[in-house]
Image (cartoon, helix red, strand yellow):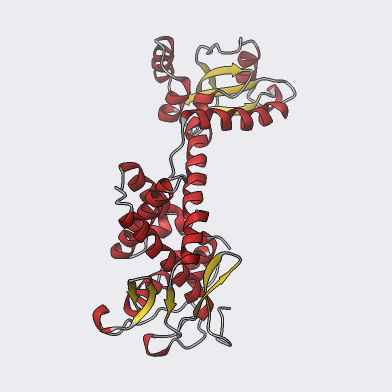
Amino acid sequence: MTLRRYLLSLVFAVAVVAAGCDQLQPAAVEVDSAEVSRATIDRELGAIAGNGALREAAGGGAGSAGSAGSAGTLPSDLTARWLTFVVEDEVVASILERRDVKVTRNDREAGRAGARTLFGSPEVFAEFPGWFRERVVALLTRRAAAAHELGGGAGLVTDAEVQAAYEERVGEIVAQCPPGVFVAHILVETAAAADAIAAELAGGASFAELARERSTDQGSAEIGGELGCFDPAQYDPAFANVASLLTPGVVSPPVQTQFGFHLIRLDDTIPLEAVEPIVREDLEAEARSAALENAEINQRAAEADVDIDPRYGRWVVRDGAGAVEPPPGAPSAT
């Protein structure tokens, strides 16, 4: 199960009540010489369980199972999964300290971006209390820095990688377009607005950028005005008649239809400028995911000296991977 999936499953945990302050609580986790108290763990699990938007996104409500002692009640398998993540975070912190790794701006950007989507969406993340949002950003920033130090990705993508991914993905789309022609447009409400955009295009402005900034067709604006493989029968006759006569790469004069005024362009492919932001965003998301699931971090966690409070389970290493295993016979989440 991926980190993101098991975090989503945590919404079925009931909130836990932290008792006492960290320095008076026994450790829930010990990783080499580092300790994390029960109060800290319970508070974090409580924040996750208390997020209504996360619970709704997962399609369920709070559940109840299993005793966690005086600290509260929550499903033991979910506690074990979170504790595994905490263990790996302590390993990450140790790597950064021993190697004197300096967290970079790119690491911080990767941490912030990863935090917004780690629990499914920015809206879900925004519903966490501020302290927990800061905790998640800091945790993912450290993980990105460690992954970068160990030779993994930190959410950074090169122009060459974007170009390669674009060619692969668009190549598949072109192969599925028998006419071999694609159409794009910028739609505005008035002739004056269309004329102004036409003048900017004549001066060398980017069609895709102007579509993103000015087009009232929000569906196509996000992808640089692209409408896809051109089938004249699917469009307003006035639009189709003009588009059919265009030379690829040439933008039409303003064309009026019932929807407004269009500036139309045909191409024999989907230009990179139209989809570059989306391709880059997808690759960066994949790189951040790779950093979160970094194999070397997982391996180092398996090699660490780990001790878990028995109320949460025990540390088990199998096939070179370490994880917290719930106590025998403990109830699990529904």
Total labels: the figure holds: 0
User: Percent position (x, y) of residue 220?
Assistant: 53, 32
Toward the viewer: 128 or 169? Answer: 169
Q: Residue at 53% of width from left, 25% of height from top?
A: 272
For this orientation, the residue located farthest to the right is 178
Toward the viewer: 277 or 201? Answer: 277
Picture layout, residue 304 above or below residue 99: below
Asked if one can make out residue 271 in the rendered structure from this viewpoint, the answer is: yes
User: Percent position (x, y) of residue 175?
Assistant: 72, 27
State which quadrant residue 22 falls in: bottom left
Picture layout, residue 92 above or below residue 59: above
State which quadrant residue 133 falls in: bottom left
Asked if one can make out residue 293 in the rendered structure from this viewpoint, the answer is: no
Q: Quadrant of the C terminus?
A: bottom right
User: Percent position (x, y) of residue 320?
Assistant: 57, 64
Q: Residue at 48% of width from left, 68% of height from top?
A: 55
Q: Quadrant of the N terminus?
A: bottom right
Q: Is residue 32 left or right of residue 289?
A: left
Q: Is residue 263 left or right of residue 69?
A: right
Q: Residue at 29% of width from left, 64% of height from top?
A: 131
User: Percent position (x, y) of residue 40?
Assistant: 33, 74
Q: Is residue 155 left or right of residue 255?
A: left
Toward the viewer: 187 or 257? Answer: 187
Picture layout, residue 15 above or below residue 193: below
